[in-house]
Amino acid sequence: MRNTPTGTDIAMAGDGSLGRQDLGGCLEWGSQSAVFRSILTHPQLVPYYEALMGTGYRMDHLPLIILQDKGSEGFALHGGRIDHTGSYAPHLAYSFAHGVMHNPLLGVSVQLCDHGPGDGGFVVLKGSHKANLPTPARLMMGKAEFAEHLQQPVTKAGDVVFFSEGTVHGAMAWTAEHQRRVALYRFAPSTCAYARMYHPEWPSSITEGLTEAQRAVLEPPYSVRLDRPAVQHDGSVKALSRPAHKKAFDKAVFGHPYF
């Protein structure tokens, strides 16, 4: 799969022949999906999900497993709170207000191998989550002259990298001898949606065998005030109930207990 142009001065290009390998369906492999499904409500991750997206977070994109062999291309820089036209991108933009971080779309990358210094793979443009100007095209394409501004996290297998989609990010060509493997998830706050796989509903191949908490994370976007089941830090599920008189009002006006 070709993801970036090739060229000797483009950090994402690799050797010009090997493409990145992408694999979907990791929630649909029966018992073999257990470890991938656990990421939805893992007790060590839920507090971070809540801190970065609030109560009632939801899975937005289907997870993607990414593989890179030595010499294979990465992925051009993308994302950011300002798009290529210079317009504000509210569906991605990170913000911080009243002591709280807001991320309408959050990347969660589970590292399935070690990423040593200079191995390549995931990189971010430092400070871009606060940018108010579009990223220059030459920088977005990974021209070598801008390499000093890109940061590659050094991680071990089992680590998890959180990043706002409001941060300009991409992947460098892979240089290590071992194969790069990551499982990439995208989550969103309870009222936000970028993707639409949830509509009209998730297929049974995904939902069969899920726990109550995991099913809660697959709820479509709507407010926690409307009886939304929300995963708690202890793994339980709790819903903030909408008052009965308000449900009765909506039923009378709209023919449904929710407006």
Image (spheres, helix red, strand yellow):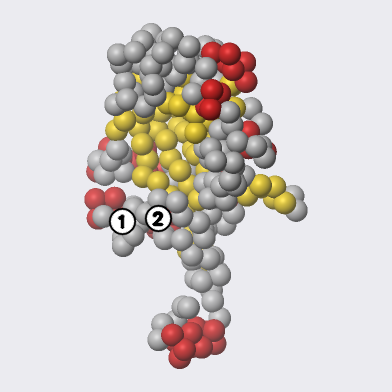
Amino acid type, callout 1 = Trp
Q: Quadrant of the N terminus?
A: top left
**Depth check, front residue: 242 or 259:** 259
Q: Position of residue 234 (x, y in %)?
A: 54, 52
Q: Residue furthest right?
A: 98
Q: Callout 1 environment at 10 Å: few (<14), some (14 to 19), or many (20+)?
A: some
Name the residue rendered at 58%, 21% in the picture: 150
- From this view, report whether residue 113 is shown above or below residue 30: above
Name the residue rendered at 50%, 29% in the picture: 77
Please tell me which of labels 1 and 2 falls first in the chain: 1
**SS type, badge 1:** loop
Name the residue rendered at 36%, 10% in the picture: 15
Disc marking residue 218: 2
Q: Quadrant of residue 204?
A: bottom left
In the picture, measured across the screen, residue 142 lies left or right of residue 100, that is left
Name the residue rendered at 31%, 43% in the picture: 27
**Depth check, front residue: 92 or 224:** 92
- From this view, report whether residue 7 is shown above or below residue 22: above
- From this view, report whether residue 228 is shown above or below residue 170: below
Q: Quadrant of residue 185?
A: top left
Mark 1–mark 2 contact, CB under 8 Å? yes
Q: Callout 2 environment at 10 Å: few (<14), some (14 to 19), or many (20+)?
A: many
Q: Position of residue 178 (x, y in %)?
A: 37, 12
**SS type, badge 2:** loop
In the picture of the structure, the residue carrying the numbered disc 1 is 202
Q: Position of residue 138 (x, y in %)?
A: 54, 23
In the picture, measured across the screen, residue 150 lies left or right of residue 254, that is right
- Number of numbered discs: 2
Q: Residue furthest bottom?
A: 252
